Image (cartoon, rainbow, N blue to C red):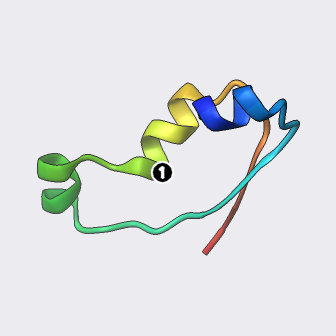
Amino acid sequence: MDGCREFGADLMVMGAYEHSKFREDILGGVTQDILEGAHLPVLMSH
């Protein structure tokens, strides 16, 4: 997200994938982190 801010982007586009609950609990979930901390619109595709 810092890169988007530095670049002055108006939209972030990313792939969104879900892993097992166990794996996300251990390693964390990037998709969830992006959604919680987004300061601009995010377009997600699976």
Image quadrant in which the C terminus is located: bottom right
Q: Residue furthest right?
A: 10
Q: Is residue 17 left or right of residue 1?
A: left
Vertical comparison of 31 with 46: above or below: above
Instruction: Name the residue rendered at 78%, 34% in the picture.
Output: 7
Res. 43 image quadrant: bottom right
What x and y, as percent, mark residue 32? 45, 44
Q: Secondary structure at mark 1?
A: helix
Q: Neighbour class for label 1 at 10 Å: few (<14), some, many (≥20)?
A: some
Give whichever of 46, 13 is nearer the camera: 13
What x and y, as percent, mark residue 5? 72, 27
In the image, what residue type sits under mark 1?
Thr
Q: Give the mark count.
A: 1
What x and y, as percent, mark residue 10? 88, 36
Res. 2 image quadrant: top right
Give whichever of 46, 2 is nearer the camera: 2
Image quadrant in which the N terminus is located: top right
Res. 40 image quadrant: top right
Instruction: Name the residue rendered at 56%, 38% in the picture.
Output: 35
Q: Residue furthest front?
A: 6
Vertical comparison of 11 with 6: above or below: below
Q: Is residue 22 left or right of residue 39?
A: left
The residue beneath circle 1 is 31
Vertical comparison of 24 with 46: above or below: above
Instruction: Name the residue rendered at 83%, 43% in the picture.
Output: 11
Q: Is residue 5 left or right of residue 10?
A: left
Instruction: Name the residue rendered at 13%, 59% in the picture.
Output: 22
